[in-house]
Image (cartoon, coloured by chain):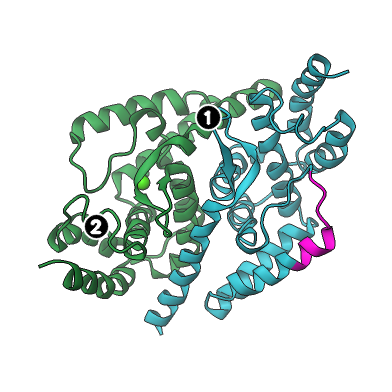
Chain colours: A green, B cyan
Amino acid sequence: MSADRISAQLAFLTEADRLKSIDRATTLCDASRRENSAEHSWHIALYALTMAEHASRPVNVGRVIQMLLLHDIVEIDAGDAPIHGSPDPDLQAAKEQAAADRIFGLLPADQRDAFRAIWEEFEAAETDDAIFAKSIDRVQPVIANLETGGGTWPEYNVTPEQLETRVGVKVKRGAPAIWEALKARIDRWFAENTG
Amino acid sequence: MSADRISAQLAFLTEADRLKSIDRATTLCDASRRENSAEHSWHIALYALTMAEHASRPVNVGRVIQMLLLHDIVEIDAGDAPIHGSPDPDLQAAKEQAAADRIFGLLPADQRDAFRAIWEEFEAAETDDAIFAKSIDRVQPVIANLETGGGTWPEYNVTPEQLETRVGVKVKRGAPAIWEALKARIDRWFAENTG
Ligand SMILES: [Ca+2]
Protein backbone atom coordinates (compact mmCIF):
# COMPACT_ATOMS: atom_id res chain seq x y z
CA MET A 1 0.00 0.00 0.00
CA SER A 2 1.30 3.41 -0.99
CA ALA A 3 0.79 5.10 2.42
CA ASP A 4 2.70 2.31 4.23
CA ARG A 5 5.51 2.48 1.68
CA ILE A 6 5.79 6.24 2.05
CA SER A 7 5.83 6.01 5.80
CA ALA A 8 8.62 3.36 5.75
CA GLN A 9 10.61 5.48 3.30
CA LEU A 10 10.20 8.58 5.46
CA ALA A 11 11.28 6.61 8.56
CA PHE A 12 14.52 5.72 6.74
CA LEU A 13 15.04 9.28 5.48
CA THR A 14 14.40 10.77 8.93
CA GLU A 15 16.86 8.32 10.51
CA ALA A 16 19.39 9.27 7.83
CA ASP A 17 19.23 12.87 9.11
CA ARG A 18 21.49 11.76 11.98
CA LEU A 19 24.43 11.40 9.56
CA LYS A 20 24.64 15.22 9.79
CA SER A 21 25.81 14.80 13.40
CA ILE A 22 28.60 12.27 12.68
CA ASP A 23 31.87 14.19 12.63
CA ARG A 24 34.90 13.12 10.62
CA ALA A 25 38.58 13.72 11.31
CA THR A 26 38.93 16.10 8.34
CA THR A 27 38.01 19.79 8.59
CA LEU A 28 36.34 22.08 6.07
CA CYS A 29 38.71 23.72 3.58
CA ASP A 30 38.67 26.92 5.69
CA ALA A 31 39.56 24.89 8.83
CA SER A 32 36.58 26.42 10.67
CA ARG A 33 35.29 23.08 11.98
CA ARG A 34 35.33 19.32 11.40
CA GLU A 35 33.33 18.06 8.44
CA ASN A 36 30.31 15.81 9.03
CA SER A 37 29.60 12.65 7.06
CA ALA A 38 26.41 13.98 5.39
CA GLU A 39 28.05 17.02 3.82
CA HIS A 40 31.10 14.85 2.98
CA SER A 41 28.74 12.50 1.10
CA TRP A 42 27.32 15.42 -0.90
CA HIS A 43 30.79 16.68 -1.69
CA ILE A 44 32.16 13.38 -2.99
CA ALA A 45 28.99 12.81 -5.07
CA LEU A 46 29.80 16.18 -6.68
CA TYR A 47 33.43 15.08 -7.09
CA ALA A 48 32.24 11.95 -8.90
CA LEU A 49 29.90 13.94 -11.16
CA THR A 50 32.72 16.33 -12.05
CA MET A 51 35.64 13.87 -12.36
CA ALA A 52 34.13 10.64 -13.73
CA GLU A 53 36.07 11.14 -16.96
CA HIS A 54 39.29 10.33 -15.07
CA ALA A 55 38.14 6.86 -13.99
CA SER A 56 40.67 4.17 -14.89
CA ARG A 57 37.85 2.19 -16.56
CA PRO A 58 34.48 3.49 -17.84
CA VAL A 59 31.93 3.90 -15.04
CA ASN A 60 28.20 4.48 -14.75
CA VAL A 61 28.34 7.80 -12.93
CA GLY A 62 24.73 7.51 -11.76
CA ARG A 63 25.52 4.26 -9.95
CA VAL A 64 28.75 5.71 -8.53
CA ILE A 65 26.76 8.64 -7.12
CA GLN A 66 24.19 6.26 -5.58
CA MET A 67 27.03 4.41 -3.85
CA LEU A 68 28.50 7.62 -2.51
CA LEU A 69 25.13 8.91 -1.25
CA LEU A 70 24.64 5.66 0.68
CA HIS A 71 28.20 4.67 1.61
CA ASP A 72 28.49 6.36 5.02
CA ILE A 73 24.95 5.85 6.39
CA VAL A 74 26.16 2.93 8.56
CA GLU A 75 28.27 5.48 10.48
CA ILE A 76 25.07 6.61 12.24
CA ASP A 77 25.53 3.53 14.44
CA ALA A 78 29.17 2.56 13.80
CA GLY A 79 30.85 5.99 13.79
CA ASP A 80 33.53 7.18 11.37
CA ALA A 81 36.78 5.20 11.34
CA PRO A 82 39.47 7.76 10.39
CA ILE A 83 41.71 6.56 7.58
CA HIS A 84 44.84 7.40 9.59
CA GLY A 85 43.46 6.14 12.91
CA SER A 86 43.88 2.51 14.04
CA PRO A 87 40.47 0.93 14.74
CA ASP A 88 40.06 -2.85 14.98
CA PRO A 89 38.95 -3.65 11.40
CA ASP A 90 36.93 -6.79 12.30
CA LEU A 91 35.07 -5.01 15.08
CA GLN A 92 34.39 -2.01 12.82
CA ALA A 93 33.11 -4.31 10.04
CA ALA A 94 30.79 -6.13 12.46
CA LYS A 95 29.41 -2.81 13.72
CA GLU A 96 28.80 -1.67 10.16
CA GLN A 97 26.99 -4.87 9.21
CA ALA A 98 24.69 -4.50 12.23
CA ALA A 99 24.11 -0.85 11.32
CA ALA A 100 23.22 -1.81 7.74
CA ASP A 101 20.73 -4.40 9.04
CA ARG A 102 19.03 -1.84 11.24
CA ILE A 103 19.06 1.27 9.06
CA PHE A 104 18.38 -0.23 5.60
CA GLY A 105 15.86 -2.44 7.43
CA LEU A 106 13.64 0.61 7.93
CA LEU A 107 12.90 0.63 4.17
CA PRO A 108 10.33 -1.43 2.26
CA ALA A 109 11.90 -4.87 1.59
CA ASP A 110 12.67 -4.29 -2.11
CA GLN A 111 14.52 -1.05 -1.37
CA ARG A 112 16.19 -2.49 1.73
CA ASP A 113 17.71 -5.19 -0.50
CA ALA A 114 18.61 -2.83 -3.35
CA PHE A 115 20.32 -0.22 -1.14
CA ARG A 116 22.09 -2.92 0.86
CA ALA A 117 23.41 -4.46 -2.37
CA ILE A 118 24.77 -1.09 -3.53
CA TRP A 119 26.46 -0.55 -0.15
CA GLU A 120 27.95 -4.08 -0.17
CA GLU A 121 29.21 -3.48 -3.72
CA PHE A 122 30.95 -0.29 -2.56
CA GLU A 123 32.49 -2.05 0.43
CA ALA A 124 33.75 -4.97 -1.70
CA ALA A 125 35.52 -2.56 -4.10
CA GLU A 126 35.59 -5.06 -6.95
CA THR A 127 33.41 -3.57 -9.70
CA ASP A 128 34.60 -0.65 -11.82
CA ASP A 129 31.93 1.62 -10.29
CA ALA A 130 32.96 0.72 -6.74
CA ILE A 131 36.68 1.05 -7.44
CA PHE A 132 36.16 4.57 -8.78
CA ALA A 133 33.78 5.48 -5.93
CA LYS A 134 36.38 4.34 -3.36
CA SER A 135 39.11 6.37 -5.05
CA ILE A 136 36.96 9.52 -5.00
CA ASP A 137 36.16 8.96 -1.31
CA ARG A 138 39.94 9.10 -0.68
CA VAL A 139 40.65 12.15 -2.84
CA GLN A 140 38.42 14.69 -1.10
CA PRO A 141 40.09 14.51 2.36
CA VAL A 142 43.53 14.94 0.72
CA ILE A 143 42.32 18.19 -0.82
CA ALA A 144 40.90 19.33 2.55
CA ASN A 145 44.27 18.58 4.19
CA LEU A 146 46.22 20.38 1.46
CA GLU A 147 43.90 23.41 1.73
CA THR A 148 44.44 23.62 5.50
CA GLY A 149 48.23 23.46 5.78
CA GLY A 150 48.42 19.70 6.20
CA GLY A 151 45.14 19.38 8.09
CA THR A 152 45.00 16.14 10.07
CA TRP A 153 48.37 14.83 8.82
CA PRO A 154 50.46 16.26 11.68
CA GLU A 155 47.81 15.18 14.25
CA TYR A 156 48.00 11.56 13.03
CA ASN A 157 51.80 11.73 12.33
CA VAL A 158 51.17 10.73 8.73
CA THR A 159 54.26 9.92 6.68
CA PRO A 160 54.48 10.11 2.87
CA GLU A 161 54.80 6.29 2.84
CA GLN A 162 51.58 5.90 4.83
CA LEU A 163 49.78 8.31 2.54
CA GLU A 164 50.97 6.30 -0.45
CA THR A 165 49.85 2.98 1.09
CA ARG A 166 46.54 4.01 2.64
CA VAL A 167 45.45 6.61 0.11
CA GLY A 168 47.60 6.66 -3.02
CA VAL A 169 47.21 2.99 -3.88
CA LYS A 170 43.42 3.26 -3.77
CA VAL A 171 43.22 6.54 -5.66
CA LYS A 172 45.58 5.24 -8.36
CA ARG A 173 43.52 2.08 -8.78
CA GLY A 174 40.39 4.05 -9.66
CA ALA A 175 41.68 7.39 -10.93
CA PRO A 176 45.43 7.45 -11.68
CA ALA A 177 45.41 10.89 -13.33
CA ILE A 178 43.93 12.46 -10.21
CA TRP A 179 46.60 10.92 -7.97
CA GLU A 180 49.29 12.21 -10.31
CA ALA A 181 47.87 15.73 -9.95
CA LEU A 182 47.72 15.45 -6.15
CA LYS A 183 51.15 13.88 -5.78
CA ALA A 184 52.99 17.05 -6.79
CA ARG A 185 51.11 19.07 -4.15
CA ILE A 186 51.58 16.35 -1.50
CA ASP A 187 55.33 16.04 -2.14
CA ARG A 188 55.72 19.79 -1.87
CA TRP A 189 53.89 19.84 1.48
CA PHE A 190 56.03 17.09 3.00
CA ALA A 191 59.24 18.65 1.65
CA GLU A 192 58.33 21.98 3.28
CA ASN A 193 56.90 20.67 6.56
CA THR A 194 58.86 17.60 7.63
CA GLY A 195 62.25 15.97 7.64
CA MET B 1 45.34 19.06 -21.30
CA SER B 2 44.47 16.65 -18.52
CA ALA B 3 46.45 18.45 -15.77
CA ASP B 4 44.76 21.80 -16.57
CA ARG B 5 41.34 20.15 -16.64
CA ILE B 6 41.93 18.49 -13.30
CA SER B 7 43.15 21.69 -11.76
CA ALA B 8 40.05 23.62 -13.01
CA GLN B 9 37.78 20.84 -11.70
CA LEU B 10 39.49 20.87 -8.31
CA ALA B 11 39.18 24.68 -8.13
CA PHE B 12 35.40 24.29 -8.59
CA LEU B 13 35.18 21.44 -6.07
CA THR B 14 37.22 23.35 -3.49
CA GLU B 15 35.03 26.44 -3.94
CA ALA B 16 31.95 24.19 -3.53
CA ASP B 17 33.24 23.29 -0.04
CA ARG B 18 31.92 26.68 1.12
CA LEU B 19 28.32 25.45 0.73
CA LYS B 20 28.95 23.62 4.04
CA SER B 21 29.01 27.03 5.75
CA ILE B 22 25.71 28.34 4.29
CA ASP B 23 23.05 27.89 6.96
CA ARG B 24 19.37 27.40 6.18
CA ALA B 25 16.32 28.36 8.27
CA THR B 26 15.45 24.70 8.96
CA THR B 27 17.10 22.76 11.78
CA LEU B 28 18.22 19.13 11.96
CA CYS B 29 15.49 16.65 12.97
CA ASP B 30 16.87 16.67 16.56
CA ALA B 31 16.72 20.51 16.62
CA SER B 32 20.39 20.62 17.71
CA ARG B 33 21.39 23.26 15.13
CA ARG B 34 20.43 24.80 11.79
CA GLU B 35 21.03 22.66 8.73
CA ASN B 36 23.57 23.77 6.12
CA SER B 37 22.95 23.71 2.38
CA ALA B 38 25.56 21.02 1.62
CA GLU B 39 24.11 18.39 3.96
CA HIS B 40 20.61 19.45 2.83
CA SER B 41 21.68 18.73 -0.76
CA TRP B 42 22.88 15.25 0.24
CA HIS B 43 19.65 14.58 2.09
CA ILE B 44 17.32 15.55 -0.76
CA ALA B 45 19.41 13.55 -3.25
CA LEU B 46 18.77 10.56 -0.94
CA TYR B 47 15.07 11.52 -0.80
CA ALA B 48 14.95 11.50 -4.61
CA LEU B 49 16.73 8.12 -4.80
CA THR B 50 14.27 6.65 -2.30
CA MET B 51 11.02 8.27 -3.45
CA ALA B 52 11.31 8.59 -7.25
CA GLU B 53 8.53 6.03 -7.66
CA HIS B 54 6.05 8.65 -6.37
CA ALA B 55 6.80 11.19 -9.11
CA SER B 56 3.66 12.37 -10.89
CA ARG B 57 5.30 11.54 -14.23
CA PRO B 58 8.21 9.14 -14.89
CA VAL B 59 11.61 10.72 -14.14
CA ASN B 60 15.26 9.93 -14.79
CA VAL B 61 16.38 9.67 -11.19
CA GLY B 62 20.05 10.09 -12.12
CA ARG B 63 19.30 13.48 -13.70
CA VAL B 64 17.09 14.47 -10.76
CA ILE B 65 19.97 13.68 -8.39
CA GLN B 66 22.42 15.72 -10.52
CA MET B 67 20.02 18.69 -10.27
CA LEU B 68 19.74 18.34 -6.52
CA LEU B 69 23.52 18.04 -6.03
CA LEU B 70 24.00 21.28 -7.99
CA HIS B 71 20.86 23.25 -7.16
CA ASP B 72 22.09 25.21 -4.11
CA ILE B 73 25.69 25.93 -5.13
CA VAL B 74 24.78 29.51 -6.10
CA GLU B 75 23.98 30.14 -2.42
CA ILE B 76 27.73 30.34 -1.78
CA ASP B 77 27.47 33.90 -3.15
CA ALA B 78 23.73 34.59 -3.00
CA GLY B 79 22.82 33.07 0.39
CA ASP B 80 19.76 30.98 1.19
CA ALA B 81 16.36 32.67 0.66
CA PRO B 82 14.03 31.02 3.23
CA ILE B 83 10.78 29.79 1.70
CA HIS B 84 8.75 31.58 4.39
CA GLY B 85 10.88 34.74 4.40
CA SER B 86 10.21 37.70 2.06
CA PRO B 87 13.28 38.47 -0.06
CA ASP B 88 13.04 40.60 -3.21
CA PRO B 89 12.69 37.86 -5.87
CA ASP B 90 14.25 39.90 -8.73
CA LEU B 91 17.25 40.86 -6.62
CA GLN B 92 17.69 37.26 -5.41
CA ALA B 93 17.47 35.96 -9.02
CA ALA B 94 20.09 38.48 -10.19
CA LYS B 95 22.43 37.46 -7.35
CA GLU B 96 22.00 33.79 -8.25
CA GLN B 97 22.73 34.40 -11.94
CA ALA B 98 25.94 36.23 -11.03
CA ALA B 99 26.86 33.41 -8.65
CA ALA B 100 26.28 30.81 -11.38
CA ASP B 101 28.52 32.81 -13.75
CA ARG B 102 31.33 32.91 -11.22
CA ILE B 103 31.15 29.45 -9.65
CA PHE B 104 30.33 27.28 -12.69
CA GLY B 105 32.84 29.50 -14.53
CA LEU B 106 35.63 27.84 -12.56
CA LEU B 107 35.04 24.59 -14.50
CA PRO B 108 36.37 23.63 -17.96
CA ALA B 109 34.02 25.25 -20.54
CA ASP B 110 32.15 22.05 -21.50
CA GLN B 111 31.33 21.27 -17.87
CA ARG B 112 30.57 24.91 -17.06
CA ASP B 113 27.89 24.82 -19.78
CA ALA B 114 26.53 21.37 -18.85
CA PHE B 115 26.23 22.12 -15.12
CA ARG B 116 24.76 25.56 -15.81
CA ALA B 117 22.14 23.97 -18.11
CA ILE B 118 21.14 21.47 -15.40
CA TRP B 119 20.85 24.28 -12.85
CA GLU B 120 18.78 26.45 -15.25
CA GLU B 121 16.53 23.46 -15.95
CA PHE B 122 15.94 23.02 -12.21
CA GLU B 123 15.19 26.72 -11.76
CA ALA B 124 12.75 26.80 -14.71
CA ALA B 125 10.77 23.86 -13.21
CA GLU B 126 9.26 22.89 -16.57
CA THR B 127 10.61 19.40 -17.33
CA ASP B 128 9.35 16.32 -15.48
CA ASP B 129 12.77 15.84 -13.84
CA ALA B 130 12.87 19.45 -12.60
CA ILE B 131 9.25 19.40 -11.38
CA PHE B 132 9.96 16.31 -9.29
CA ALA B 133 13.29 17.70 -8.04
CA LYS B 134 11.56 20.92 -6.92
CA SER B 135 8.87 18.97 -5.08
CA ILE B 136 11.45 16.89 -3.20
CA ASP B 137 13.34 20.07 -2.25
CA ARG B 138 10.09 21.26 -0.57
CA VAL B 139 9.30 17.96 1.20
CA GLN B 140 12.43 17.60 3.32
CA PRO B 141 12.03 20.87 5.32
CA VAL B 142 8.39 19.95 6.09
CA ILE B 143 9.61 16.71 7.66
CA ALA B 144 12.28 18.59 9.65
CA ASN B 145 9.60 20.98 10.94
CA LEU B 146 7.21 18.14 11.84
CA GLU B 147 10.03 16.31 13.64
CA THR B 148 10.85 19.39 15.73
CA GLY B 149 7.42 20.41 16.99
CA GLY B 150 6.67 22.84 14.17
CA GLY B 151 10.28 23.92 13.67
CA THR B 152 10.46 27.27 11.86
CA TRP B 153 6.67 27.60 11.36
CA PRO B 154 5.99 29.59 14.55
CA GLU B 155 9.09 31.76 13.95
CA TYR B 156 7.81 32.77 10.48
CA ASN B 157 4.10 32.82 11.58
CA VAL B 158 3.28 30.29 8.89
CA THR B 159 -0.44 29.62 8.34
CA PRO B 160 -1.90 26.42 6.84
CA GLU B 161 -2.94 28.50 3.79
CA GLN B 162 0.62 29.76 3.30
CA LEU B 163 1.98 26.22 3.60
CA GLU B 164 -0.52 25.07 0.99
CA THR B 165 0.39 27.92 -1.42
CA ARG B 166 4.17 27.99 -0.98
CA VAL B 167 4.82 24.30 -0.39
CA GLY B 168 1.76 22.12 -1.04
CA VAL B 169 1.12 23.31 -4.59
CA LYS B 170 4.72 22.53 -5.59
CA VAL B 171 4.89 19.17 -3.84
CA LYS B 172 1.55 18.10 -5.34
CA ARG B 173 2.69 19.06 -8.82
CA GLY B 174 5.66 16.68 -8.68
CA ALA B 175 4.69 14.09 -6.07
CA PRO B 176 0.97 14.16 -5.10
CA ALA B 177 1.09 10.95 -3.02
CA ILE B 178 3.84 12.39 -0.81
CA TRP B 179 1.84 15.56 -0.15
CA GLU B 180 -1.18 13.48 0.76
CA ALA B 181 0.91 11.59 3.33
CA LEU B 182 2.29 14.84 4.79
CA LYS B 183 -1.05 16.65 4.82
CA ALA B 184 -2.48 14.49 7.61
CA ARG B 185 0.54 15.19 9.83
CA ILE B 186 0.49 18.92 8.96
CA ASP B 187 -3.24 19.29 9.69
CA ARG B 188 -2.78 17.57 13.03
CA TRP B 189 0.05 19.92 13.98
CA PHE B 190 -1.93 23.09 13.16
CA ALA B 191 -5.05 21.76 14.92
CA GLU B 192 -3.01 21.13 18.07
CA ASN B 193 -0.83 24.23 18.02
CA THR B 194 -2.82 27.17 16.66
CA GLY B 195 -6.30 28.73 16.56
CA1 LIG C 1 33.78 7.74 3.68
Report x, y in % for residue B194: 84, 19
**Outermost residue, top direction?**
B192
Residue B26 in sight here:
yes
**Looking at the rendering, which quadrant does residue B24 occupy?**
top right
Image coordinates of residue B122 in percent, x first then y, are 72, 58
Q: Main secondary structure of the magenta part?
A: helix
Whether A38 is drawn above or below A52: the answer is: above
Mark 1 lies on residue: A110
- List x then y, in percent, for residue A92: 25, 32
The answer to whether the beta carbon of the residue marked 2 is less than 8 Å from any atom of ligand 1 is no
Expressed as whole percent of the image width and height from the top left, the position of residue A136 reads: 37, 58
Tell me which residue sits at (62%, 71%) in the image: B114
Mark drawn on residue A7: none
* Residue at horizontal 86 percent and vertical 29 percent from the top: B160
Q: Nearer the viewer, residue A194 or A99?
A: A194
Disc 2 marks a residue whose amino acid type is Val
Outermost residue, bottom side: B1
Quadrant location of the C terminus of chain B?
A: top right
Residue B90 is a magenta residue: yes
Mark 2 in CB contact with mark 1 (< 8 angstroms): no
Q: Amino acid at mark 1?
A: Asp
Between marks 2 and 1, how big is the CA–CA gap? 35 Å
Numbered badge on residue A167: 2
Regarding residue B49, the answer to whether it shows in the image is: no
For disc 1, the neighbor class at 10 Å (few under 14, some 14 to 19, many from 20) is few
Left or right: A63 as drawn, with respect to A189: right
- Disc 2 secondary structure class: helix
Between B111 and B93, the one lying in front of the other is B93
The range drawn in magenta is: B85-94
Which residue is painted at 90% across and 32% down in the image? B161
Element carrying mark 1: helix
Give the residue drawn at x 76%, y 50%.
B131
